[in-house]
Image (spheres, rainbow, N blue to C red):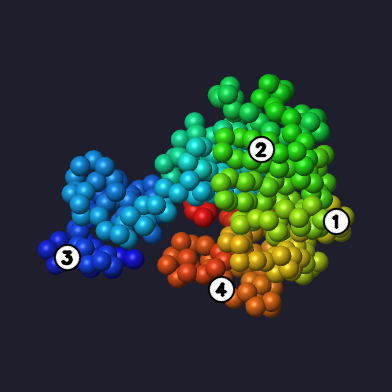
Amino acid sequence: MAKLVFSPRSRSKREVFDLTGNLFTIDDEKTESLVEDVHPSIADFVVRTRRKQSGRIDAGSSSPISELDRSAIASPDMLTFISFGSGSSGNCAYLGAAEGGILIDAGVDADTVRDGLRAHGISRHSIKGVILTHDHSDHVKYVYSLVRKRTDLPVFCTPKTLTGLLRRHSISRRIKDYHRPIYKEFAFKIGPFEITPFEVSHDGTDNVGYFIACGNQRMAIATDLGCITPRVDYYMRQANHIMIESNYDARMLATGPYPMHLKARIAADAGHLDNAVTGAFLAGIYTENLRNVFLCHLSQDNNQPDLALETVRNALNAVGITEIGSGDGSLQSRSMKLQLSALPRTESSQMFTLR
């Protein structure tokens, strides 16, 4: 851990002491471009590393702490995760490894996805495939625009999902040229990822969650579901990182302006998951192997991020799980065993590092 001390010689320069007592100076005016695509928590390390690579600082000045950080950042098991939107307006997320990444759903326009990737120094050409959870518009409406300039970019979904996508939406039938059929409970590979689709209870044509393995990391994803089924429980229990729906607060839904038939659809077993159910489920399956929970698909009208987080946190606290960070990357948060975040509905999230 480094302690930052501003030099009296220049406000643009910082003298940084690491735990071994080594001192180095960073000129913020000259190095701003070196760190514009990285998280602030590792900015100083990246400046040193990139300067070293370009021959601008003495390679002998590195410290054991820097070497420790380097090994963590370069770990082949490290994953990165970004959400470009999570809600009824559109859903799309990126999961990346050193060898490339995948997009999960395609309900956000191509420009937003491209710009979001570029903001974190990720080339769209590193994307190895798109996986779709189901055929509702907020998960698929931009799938063709995302892939049409990449003839080598496959789209993975079940055959029934493809049929529903073409039947229900004005998406070019050329998407069939990109389609790679997948089947529930049969694992398939995209780059470094081994991905297993599993059944979830929702009212799309054919609905899946995904269990994604890469090195020692395991992520389980269930974006839209009305209840916790045995297959959801089975895969979520194995995960280090979970992305799960926390769509509505039961009281807000009951007292809100929606017509009764829509309230009934949302609350049905094939509808969406409410905060209390999500919290109770997570509290029931928690182990120390679980490191990140991302609450997704929060309703604009029947939920609030703070309310969803509070409900889930209280459920975890009730069973003795109290070391819960906010996932913001701060030192205080990272010291906690579990990170809990609510993904933004219509904006891109920060880039999360999954270890």
- The residue located at (68%, 56%) in the rendering is 238
Is label 2 or label 4 in front? 4
Q: The residue tagged with tag 4: helix, strand or loop? A: loop
**Is residue 189 or residue 161 the one in the foreground?**
189
Q: CA distance from mark 3 to mark 2?
A: 50 Å
* Residue located beneath label 4 in the image: 323
Marks 3 and 2, the one that precedes in the sequence? 3
114 sits to left or right of 58: right
- Marks 4 and 3: in contact by CB < 8 Å? no
Q: Residues within 10 Å of mark 1 (few under 14, many from 20)?
A: some
- The residue located at (63%, 28%) in the rendering is 154
Q: Is residue 265 above or below residue 322?
A: above
348 sits to left or right of 22: right
- The residue located at (58%, 55%) in the rendering is 344
Marks 3 and 4, the one that precedes in the sequence? 3
Name the kind of residue labelled 4 in the image. Answer: Glu
Query: Count of labels shown?
Result: 4
Q: CA distance from mark 4 to mark 1?
A: 32 Å
Is label 3 or label 4 in front? 4
* Residue located beneath label 2 in the image: 131
* Residue located beneath label 1 in the image: 269
Marks 2 and 4, the one that precedes in the sequence? 2
Is label 2 or label 1 in front? 2
Name the kind of residue labelled 1 in the image. Answer: Asp
- Marks 1 and 4: in contact by CB < 8 Å? no
Marks 4 and 1, the one that precedes in the sequence? 1
Q: In which quadrant of the rendered image does the N terminus lie?
A: bottom left
Q: The residue tagged with tag 1: helix, strand or loop? A: loop
**Residue 327 position in % (x across, y down):** 52, 62
Q: CA distance from mark 3 to mark 4?
A: 36 Å
* Residue located beneath label 3 in the image: 7
Name the kind of residue labelled 2 in the image. Answer: Ile
